[in-house]
Each structure stands twice: as C-alpha cells, then as structure tokens.
C-alpha cells in the first residue's frame, strides 16, 4: 500500500503495491543497468574466478547485494527461478521458472566463475578437440612446455617466465584439452594448471617422468625446468 494525502492534508491508505525508487547502477551515457545482468556480463569474460569484493567494486554496489545477486543467478541457471534485480519502483510480478542451463556459476578458490556442467564435459571436450585440429603455434608450444615442466603453475607465473601475456594461449591449451585446472593457490586463490593424459598420449610417453631434461639445452644455462 502507498500513502497519499487528502485535500485536508490527512494521509489515507490507497490499495496497490508500495512503490519507491531503487538505487540505479549508473554508467555515464547508458540507461539504468540491472545488477544481475551487469554481474553476468563481467563473469562472462572472466578468465579467473572473481571474488565477491572484486565484483562489488566493479559495479559499485554493497557486497551483500552482490551476494544476493549471485544467489539469484545460480538459481536461474539451475532452472529454479528467474534472475533480475528486484525492483520496488514497479509492481511485483510472479517470478517465472527457468530452464536448467548447460553451464553453472560455481565458487572456486574464493571466487565465482562460469563452468560447463559436469554432465556436458565430455561432449564439450570432444567438440572443442574436433574444432581444434590445427597445429599449435610457437607461443602455445612454449607455454605448454612451461606448464609441463613447472606444474602446477599459475597463469601469472607462466607469464613471468615467458615475459608475455599468456591469457589467450592458456585458453587455447585448455580448449585443446592439453592442460587442465588442477588446484588453486592457497594464498592468492589463483588457478594452478597442469597437463592432461591427452598430452602424454600425443607425446607417446607414459608419464611426465619421461620428459627430457631441458636445462642443458637452454642457451643461458637457466635451471629450474627439470622435474624433481
């Protein structure tokens, strides 16, 4: 119900939904953005799990609101409800049930990121491999070598060793099924990568122990790539 003032100045009740104005997600030059959709857009392009605090800072909203938004998104993707920031400036509408999506919003290492649902992993892996029959580029081969010899290793550590950004290359190797996420760093929450059995198959070896020692092959005699 909402209060209105009569001619004599006394308030009286009027049937109907209570309306007020919510705080908009303001972006200069753009219309009001829905919080759920804004978080969805950010998470869609994320390469690493994003902590709630990081997401809250990105959309300039309180952490509590972001947590509630994530809960709505998860329910939406699970087919248990429809996401969308609650509005109090319009009449309430009954939420419609959704469809369980082929992906999910999962909390990993203290952050949130989209993942393919487990039951579709094999299907997606086969599709990606079928679409990725071309040979690996030299940067991809170099990155794969670093991961093979230094695993488990984070993306930032790989970039430090190669002295270049490796985001796209890591995505390529993940898509080819040659590397996978094996753990998260306890201190930083960064994803740690390692090689898969597919790499061993392609190399024709049974285990990583059969990888050759490469330190003697490095021009500067750099150490640290040999397996323990």
Image (tube, grey):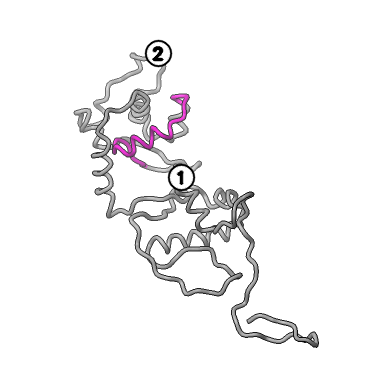
Is residue 189 or residue 64 the one in the foreground?
64
Answer with left or right where residue 78 lies relative to residue 27.
left
Q: Nearer the viewer, mark 1 or mark 2?
A: 1
In magenta, the rendered stretch is 161-182
Q: Is residue 16 above or below residue 188?
A: below
Judged left or right of residue 194, residue 2 is right
Going 44% across and 24% down the picture, which residue do you hit?
162
Question: Is residue 183 among the parts visible in the rendering?
Answer: yes
Q: In the picture, which quadrant includes the N terminus?
A: bottom right
* In magenta segment, residue 86: no
Q: Is residue 119 left or right of residue 106?
A: left
Label 1 environment density (alpha carbons within 10 Å; few <14, some 14–19, many ≥20): few
On the image, the x and y values in percent for residue 203 come to: 22, 28
| Residue drawn at x 51%, y 53% as measured from the top left | 39
Element assignment for label 2: loop
Q: Earlier in the sequence, mark 1 or mark 2?
A: 1
One can see residue 228 in this view: no
Q: Which residue is mark 1?
A: 45
Observer-nearest residue: 53 or 221? 53
Q: Nearer the viewer, residue 126 or 94?
A: 94
């Amino acid at each position: 119900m909402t209060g209105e003032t009569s001619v004599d100045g006394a308030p009286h009740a009027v049937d109907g939904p209570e309306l007020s104005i919510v705080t908009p997600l303001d972006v200069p030059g753009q219309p009001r953005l829905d919080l759920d959709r804004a978080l969805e857009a950010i998470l869609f392009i994320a390469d690493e799990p994003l902590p709630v605090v990081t997401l809250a800072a990105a959309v300039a909203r309180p952490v509590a609101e972001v947590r509630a938004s994530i809960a709505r998104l998860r329910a939406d993707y699970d087919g248990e409800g429809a996401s969308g920031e609650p509005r109090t400036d319009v009449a309430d509408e009954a939420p419609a049930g959704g469809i369980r999506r082929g992906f999910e919003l999962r909390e990993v290492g203290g952050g949130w990121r989209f993942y393919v649902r487990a039951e579709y992993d094999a299907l997606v892996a086969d599709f990606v491999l079928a679409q990725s029959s071309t040979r690996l580029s030299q940067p991809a081969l170099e990155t794969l070598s670093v991961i093979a010899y230094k695993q488990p290793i984070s993306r930032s550590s790989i970039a430090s060793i190669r002295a270049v950004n490796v985001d796209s290359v890591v995505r390529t190797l993940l898509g080819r099924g040659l590397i996978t996420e094996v753990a998260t760093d306890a201190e930083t929450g960064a994803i740690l990568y390692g090689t898969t059995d597919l790499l061993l198959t392609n190399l024709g070896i049974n285990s990583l122990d059969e990888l050759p020692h490469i330190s003697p092959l490095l021009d500067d005699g750099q150490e640290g790539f040999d397996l323990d």
